Image (cartoon, rainbow, N blue to C red):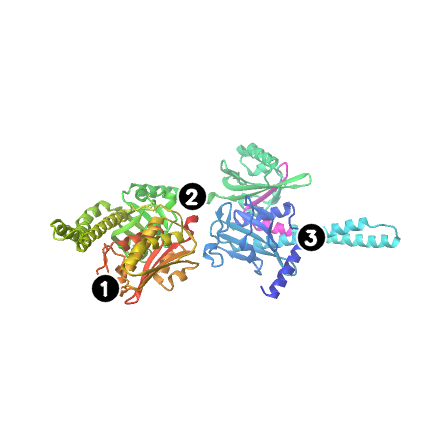
Amino acid sequence: MNSSSSEYETERIEALYEYKILNTEAEPVFDNLVYLATNICETPVAVINLIDTKKHWFKSCIGWEGVKKKIPFCDFTISYPDLLIVTDCLEDERFERNSFTINGKLVRFYTGVPLKNAAGYSVGTLCVLDYTPRSLSLKQIESLKALGKQVMMILELRRDSIDVQQKSEKIQQQELSKTAEFIEINQRLESEVNQRQEIEKALQISHKYLSGIVDIADDAIISMDKEQNILLFNQGAEKIFGYTAAEVIGKPLDILLPTKYHQSHRKYVVDFEKSNDRARRMGKRQEIFVRRKNGEEFPVEASISKLKLDRNIIFTAILRNISEEKKSKEALSQLSQKHELILNSIGEGLFGLDKSGKITFVNPAAISLLGYEKQELIGQNIDMLLANNPCIAKPDADIECVVRKFKIQEVSNDIFRRKDGSVFPVEYIHNPILDRGKVVGAVIAFKDISDRQIIERMKDEFISVVSHELRTPLASIHGSLCILDRGLIDTSSTKGKRLLHIAADSTARLVELVNNILDIERITYGKMKMHKQICEVSEIIVYAANKMQNMAQRYGVSLSVSTISAQIWADGDRIIQTLTNLLSNAIKFSTSGGNVRLSAYICEDLETCIGNNKNLSEYFSRRYTGTYVSFQVKDEGCGIPIDKLDNIFDKFHQVDTSDTRKKEGSGLGLTICQHIVQQHLGKIWVESKLDRGSTFYLILPLHLYEE
């Protein structure tokens, strides 16, 4: 902060303290203005917020229960010359990381008027807030500005009144021993009287100003006394009820109510007077009806407030005609019911998307197949159902194509994810939803094809595994044991021990292959479960490195680690399985005397983790944009050809290199690693240069254990 802004802040705080308003009791005059703000702007929350150096003082607040806290938007508002409007906090770059809540709900909408004194210093704000994105009409904005000016006028009058009172008390305490002092006191008193007269005149102007605000409101605003005789009847009330103000002022409120509601309404007002509530929304138990001058009855939304003035009490009701709104809701409900009957009768899973890929409706068949409740799916992005199967480059590409283009497509083989994390194969057809020739969304019909794929899997993949991957280690075992069984070589000799070692290694390879095949089966049918808990990153790295140390020594490769102190929410055994698999590959493809390094570090932003990789940036932007833990396994081996990088994570894929040394492995390890990482909402990829080595990257969100 430069010297000029610091000086301005000091002068602003001094201006705030001049009003002697901080940490004072609630005052009805401010409560009424806040109440008007909520009704005019149609928001659940409104606040008069006085902003000190380190604290926000709420002079009046409606719609906020419990402990109050700083409103971050107000700190911006006091620096604005006019007012600050944030229609959607999540779409505004200044507040897109906003997590400000009221009553446990995320605030999405904010509009604040700076409270400026005559010298131009903002001492606070009058603001309205809502939990859904929205905007204000020009009329509402002008009314909110007018209310802000009214708040400042009352603050000025209150300050002047306090100053006058303090001066008057000081004068009364002075000794009246000398004539000159009497004259001076009289002169001062005369001056104070003049000031009071000016204050009263200003209050009259303020009253007219407030009356003007009330008159321009579209809603009916009606005030009445304790006997429920009408005292105020604004222009909005005249339009709604058909009476002029002159026709109803002084008349009982019953003139505006159907006869059958007279007694119950009077009892309601009496009970409200006895309660501790200053304001209350009416009609919670039953719908409220009122009556026009022509006798027509119609439904309204209504709220009532009370203001005590000495021994008198004034009630103010604000009413809104909801006849058309009610008719629209009934028509929409009937149409929705018909559509729902149609959707419920369809046996296939069916859901709809808007242009942004969010789910707008879903039928019972889809709910049953996916395992979600209906309310858990509505409003969520389609990404939550896409399993990101490593065998499919981008499973949501076709869906995005339908939403963005006028195109009907059929997909015969894709993967969806259930609520419990399991996945299942589907085929689906999706059609665009058109509105006046423009695509506004898509309808997707899908069905589970698990049974069909079981047959295909048995015919193709299983036969391939048995005939190719099992034959090689079995041949080694059979050949070694036959030589020893025939006594051609002594088992205690060097060659005999070598044959036993070959048989043992081949057996271990078979066990590993069987375990990998079982894992692949679990992955394919969504049965690989993750048992997550809080895990220390340093312990995972050290354990994985120690487990691979013997293998590194056997291959003449040095293994080094660099770790950090951080915690993640993960299945520790599965993460260790992933790291040991990557380390095993790095060791096998390194030359003797080479180095393999396992390291980890914290990424505060996505660019630090992925650099300029656009594909990864798009992948993470749909999921999480916070802090990550990045693991790296780097070797100095032969590297991977560039044309093999895209297939490196495919099942049974192994890289052919010019190295003549036989590389053992099932070709399933990296596929399993990729699935484990995806189950943790992370990403794994490789960067490599021939003859210079490879680096495998694995990044996981750091925040998930807190959620």
Q: Nearer the viewer, residue 40 or 425?
A: 425
Which callout, 3 or 2, points to the residue nearer the camera? 3
Which callout, 1 or 2, points to the residue nearer the camera? 1
Q: Which residues are magenta?
A: 208-227
Q: Amino acid at mark 3?
A: Arg
* Separation of marks 3 and 1 at Cα, in angstroms: 86 Å
- Give the number of the disc on residue 329: 2
Q: Amino acid at mark 1?
A: Thr
Residue 83 screen position, x and y as percent? 56, 58
Q: Amino acid at mark 2?
A: Lys
- Give the number of the disc on residue 159: 3
- Would you call the spot at circle 2 few (<14 residues within 10 Å), some (14-19), or many (20 or more)? few
Residue at 82%, 50% in the rendered image:
174
Q: Nearer the viewer, residue 49 or 220?
A: 49
* Separation of marks 3 and 2 at Cα, in angstroms: 50 Å
Residue 644 occupies quadrant: bottom left
- For label 2, the SS is helix
Q: Which residue is mark 1?
A: 657
- Give the number of the disc on residue 308: none
